[in-house]
């Protein structure tokens, strides 16, 4: 098996030009997913009557279906359903004129929200109930207790899993090409198709992903070290 490294050298700068697209897909999807995931985790953790059961079914459904299927539903079926509904109410809004990235954000957020929800829910279980009672005893209300006592510790415990989810999201953005969004994998496939050098194209994109993921892990390490101060209820030390 011979690899044309000359093609890889020429394709590499072309592929890295699309890193901003991959990062945009990753960051916006994460910003959508994080608050939704935290909210779902809280509802699940506190077993809110009625809603918690719905969320658990949703989580099981998403975890039990491939991302490709979720993309198919969001990109192919959802626009048809929305178009039909809009026509019924007399609206002339063209769903198919929307930027494909919007559908990509929705599709990628579905599984990412579940990942974050499960990570935060697990983190919430590590917080000792006695700390909530102590916070109440010193006059903190529920919101203050959550943001100053509970969430810092829960997020510290969940952070490694959240980072893994973020890394997985970077890789999953490669599926956005199925929704006509050209990111680093899509560009590599286009270059490989032009010269029938698919192996070299995949080698190129693999190198780019490795660089991105290593950078994310390097950035995450000092953040995790700072968050470790919250573990074991050391919130007071973190505030000082």
Image (cartoon, grey):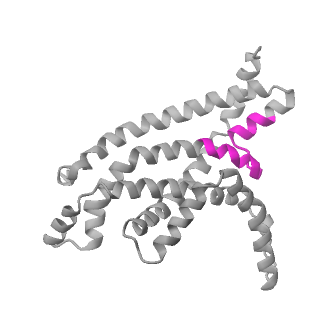
Return the residue found at the far left.
Answer: 138
Q: In this view, does 224 lie to the left or right of 203?
A: left
166 and 114: which is toward the camera: 114
Q: Where is residue 4 in the image (x, y as percent from the top left)?
A: 77, 17
Tell me: 103 left or right of 158: right
Residue 139 appears left or right of 221: left
Instruction: Please tell me which residue is depicted at 44% across the width and 66% down the height of the picture.
Output: 39
**Is there any visible trace of residue 21 in the rendered image?**
no
Report the residue that reaches farthest toward the top: 2
Q: Give the residue displayed 69% in from the left and 27% down from the top.
A: 204
Q: Which residue lies furthest to the bottom in this view?
A: 89
Relative side of 39 to 124, left or right: right
- Residue 140 place in picture, x, y as percent: 20, 71
In the rendered view, tell whether residue 28 sits above or below residue 132. above
Indicate whether residue 41 is drawn in magenta: no
Residue 127 location (% of width, % of height): 27, 57
Residue 154 vs residue 238, the one in the foreground = 154
Residue sitting nearer the eye, 97 or 220? 220
- Residue at position x 21%, y 53% from top? 233
Please provide the residue range marked out in magenta.
Answer: 171-190
């Amino acid at each position: 098996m011979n690899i044309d490294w000359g093609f890889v050298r020429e394709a590499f700068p072309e592929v890295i030009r699309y890193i901003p697209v991959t990062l945009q897909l990753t960051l916006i999807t994460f910003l959508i997913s994080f608050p939704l995931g935290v909210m779902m985790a809280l509802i699940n953790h506190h077993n809110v009557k009625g809603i918690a059961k719905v969320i658990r079914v949703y989580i099981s459904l998403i975890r039990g279906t491939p991302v490709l299927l979720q993309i198919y539903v969001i990109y192919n079926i959802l626009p048809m359903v929305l178009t039909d509904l809009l026509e019924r109410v007399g609206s002339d809004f063209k769903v198919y004129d929307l930027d494909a990235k919007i559908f990509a954000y929705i599709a990628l957020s579905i599984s990412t929200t579940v990942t974050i929800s499960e990570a935060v829910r697990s983190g919430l279980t590590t917080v000792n109930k006695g700390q909530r009672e102590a916070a109440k005893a010193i006059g903190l209300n529920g919101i203050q207790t959550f943001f100053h006592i509970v969430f810092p510790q829960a997020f510290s415990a969940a952070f490694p899993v959240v980072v893994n989810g973020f890394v997985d999201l970077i890789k999953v953005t490669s599926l956005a090409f199925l929704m006509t969004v050209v990111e680093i994998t899509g560009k590599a496939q286009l270059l490989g198709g032009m010269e029938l050098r698919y192996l070299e194209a995949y080698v190129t994109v693999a190198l780019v992903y490795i660089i991105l993921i290593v950078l994310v892990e390097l950035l995450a390490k000092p953040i995790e070290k700072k968050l470790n101060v919250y573990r074991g209820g050391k919130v007071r030390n973190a505030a000082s």
